[in-house]
Amino acid sequence: MSLKALKSELSGELYDDNLIKSIYATDASVYRKLPFAVAYPKNKDDLKQLIQFAKTKNTSLIPRTAGTSLAGQCVGDGIIVDVSKYFTDIINFDEKNKTITVQPGVVRDALNNYLKPHGLFFSPNTSTSNRCMIGGMVGNNSSGTTSIQYGVTRDKVLEMHTILSDGSEVVFGELSTDEFQEKLKQDDLEGQIYKTIFTELKSEVVQKQVLNHFPKPEIHRRNTGYAIDELIKTQVFSKSNSKFNMCKLLSGSEGTLAFTTQITLKLDKLPPQEAVMVAVHFDSIKNCMQAVESLMEHNLYACEMMDKTILDCTKHNKTQQDNRRFIIGDPKAILMCEVRAETIEEVDKQAQNLVNTIESTGLSYAFPTLKGDNINKANELRSAGLGLLGNIIGDKKGVACIEDTAVALTDLANYINDFSDLMQKHNQDAIYYAHAGAGEIHLRPILDIKKSTDVHLFRLITTEVAQLVKSYRGSMSGEHGDGIVRSEFIEFMIGQDNYNILKRIKFVFDPENIFNPGKIVNALPMDENLRYVSDRQEPEIETLLDFSKSLGILREAEKCNGSGDCRKLPEFGGTMCPSYRATRNEKDTTRARANALREFLTNSEKINKFNHTELKEVFDLCLSCKACSSECPSSVDVASLKAEFQYQYQKENGVPLRSKLFAYNNRFNSIGSKVPKLSNFVFSNPILASLIKKSIGIASKRSLLLISNTSLDKYIKRIDSQTYNKDYIKKIYLFNDEFTNHLDTSIGIDTLELLTALNYQVEVVKNEESGRSFLSKGLLLQAKNFANKNVSIYKDLISKDTPLIGIEPSAILTFKDEYLKLADDKTSAEAIAKHCFLIEEFIQQEIDLGNITPDQFTTQEQTIKFHGHCHQKASSNQLSSFKVLNLPKNYKVTIIPSGCCGMAGSFGYEKEHYEVSMQIGEQTLFPAVRKATQDTIISANGTSCRHQIKDGTQREAKHPITILKEALL
């Protein structure tokens, strides 16, 4: 059977094109292997077809869910089998027995949202919990912050439905000794598996050999090879009362033994509701490690560590600024120790006892206590730690290779001392973070794996750390799995005889080696198949946008480390990534776009390396919302990458007519504003509007914006002679953007009237349009021209005392973002950016200064629901709009947690994008608006957002400034 024939047989999808293969060539590790194909199976029959095909064609199947593996588990040259799209059902929930049965593509946090009303949760908690999936957690035997209290994934797996390598369906679960003996009588593959397990492990000599060479039993985070040490603890092999369960072996097996289709999990009661976190600050790693053992004598629910490198990375990430407020001084390390109880009195008592212990050690210089949302903020900072490592500028990065070692808690301080000595020997300043209370510190050397010298260090350091870990009888892999990076060391860690047992177990499960080969046994070399070819001359890519802060566009794309934050779903908040949330396709993630661009810029042999239709496809559904620039821990700016791609691609392929029409829309609006009644008749007449839409590719269901009766330019000329109070508070410059000027003139007028009434002198000079429409279509030369002209206009006008204020977020925020990458006069552009504000930001600052007070506004009651613009969320702060709307004393304002509205300028107009646009709106925004009562005011500060709300809900949304102006006394 050919791939084409297989594709026709599957209910799901199968791809073998260059784009999809390049996207799936990497996970969150340092490895890269181009797969043979990528499958999205819909059911078990699809999986059986894939298994049969793999056997027939001598290829392999690499199971994948969210693709956040750090050790290369999801990388392979066979068929990547992505179950994250269709295997996503919760099959059965037994509240009484506290169990739940799910398919492998269920997201961990989504599962816990489902369970929360019942007072239960699935306790293993990784830093990727808002996108990682149960199948991946079982495959890796994930642990996370909760393991010191609740255990690891392996402890929670009760039953697994699997498909074996011969295509047979087998359910693995608990077996008594008698039931196990019955399994030995079977003549099928399942029976052979049980016979092999029994034969290999029944000898007391072998059992002693396993116990002597596997990690110390008190280390509960242990993934070194297959967990045969867990199997010999059962009644089949010992005097234990514990039943045998093959799930112990399958957990942590990384999809190398069978394909899992269904998992039954044991649940825990939710933790006690009252919590206090003590953030213990240290001036050295040594002091931090010495404190852990004494702190763990308390009943901690978490004991997590972050070092200075991680903390410093967060300084430059917009999203993390507020989360850093608890940090005192410049600590070398922080231990985040959490206690819990059912009452405030009891949890405060526990926290005080913990503080007393800290003080008695004399090892910490500060230990602030956190409660409520401040605990969540600190945990968000910790969770972002891994991705934030990508913020290190240049080719040197914190590399995952030795980051998953675990030792007994009593050995931790000495182990870290020895480890630090080892790092100093190699002139390494390693990164330390994660699960101190579990004896596991994520340690990362900083290496440039583009250089052969550092690839040599990569192997050397890993080898020496393996020797160190073995000397403490620790685990080389605590929770991140063996994958490619550590499988090579399993034989050394557990001994040849034990390793041979693992090989024979693999062989009986999978004799033709079709399930994820090269992982755990018969390992691939850990220093081959890397993302980068050592000592290769990396291409120098010339761009029009200035990517020098990232050392070029290629390194901007390389900042993506694959952590997969862009796969989080709407229920978990934020905006990134709206297109993925609509389609649930990996192709439509921020990660895919960065990876695809890296692949083609690096490997293309074309003169113009951007000239690939594959790149056009991967960027097609990018809405340029900019959420990735702030929500992605590595701050990968895909909106800028897309703009540069469009510019470069269109050099070779021309600019489509529709793109030109959208880009030059301000020119057409200017013409239309001369005869607004005629223009609006054409735009609103069903027949004429339909002809316009059809002729240029606008969605038939999309309404056309109407021209204002007068432009703001004309209005300003009419009032230009007005005089201001000589005792005005401040002089400000208002940027008359192209959208306000012709489409939302009334909002511009409201702004002028409001600011004047509040005693500000508002100056409006003749400026150019922002260039936003040109940026969105990749017409960067035109956008650069506008940037240069506007910088020239304002460079001698704007200062701390005379700021530049704007109404439309997408327009005014170009001064703070794209102009810094476009303008020739960088110094002036940066100076303007420092004193450039969205109108709500400016008013909030004036409120804080006491220049604007609630007494100036109505006391009537009003309920308002506010939706913020994506660019405001990414480059500014929507809390300013919230505070401004709350200025009148009796206004009750809530922010709709809506992410992107889905309109994104011209995106929502385009016929091929309309359905996705509306799907995005339906995720959170439209339902929230529809639920609002008719007397609730809907507010949105973006032109596109108000248009989308109108088309999606038939509700008119007001700009916050209009609401505030109407509230003036």
Image: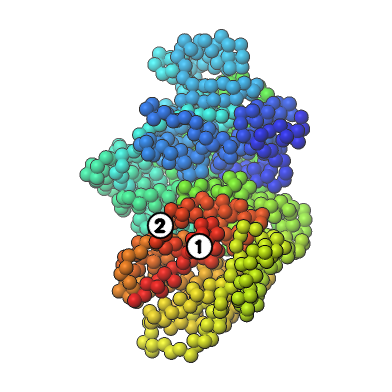
Q: Quadrant of the N terminus?
A: top right
Check residue 869 in the rendering and tell me which mark sits there, or answer none: 1
Query: Label 1: how many residues lie within 10 Å, few (<14), some (14-19) or many (20+)?
Result: many
Query: Label 2: how many residues lie within 10 Å, few (<14), some (14-19) or many (20+)?
Result: few
Q: Which residue corresponds to the image point at 30% horizontal and 52% vertical from the top-left?
A: 368
> Which element type, helix, strand or loop, lies under badge 2?
loop
User: What sort of colour scheme is used for the picture?
Assistant: rainbow
Total of numbered circles in the picture? 2
Residue 339 percent coordinates (x, y): 31, 42
Residue 375 percent coordinates (x, y): 35, 49
Q: Is residue 534 visible?
A: no
Q: Which residue corresponds to the image point at 38% horizontal and 88% vertical from the top-left?
A: 725
In the picture, residue 684 is in which quadrant? bottom right
Q: Looking at this view, is 72 or 815 the one in front?
A: 815
Q: Looking at this view, is 102 or 385 the one in front?
A: 102
Residue 360 percent coordinates (x, y): 25, 45
> Which element type, helix, strand or loop, lies under badge 1?
loop
Q: Looking at this view, is 498 or 83 the one in front?
A: 83
Q: Is residue 620 left or right of residue 740?
A: right
Q: Give the distance between the C-alpha atoms of the residues marked 1 and 2, in whole angstroms.
A: 22 Å
Check residue 933 in the rendering and tell me which mark sits there, or answer none: 2
Seen in the picture, residue 179 relative to 15 is either above or below; the reply is above
Q: Is residue 692 visible?
A: yes
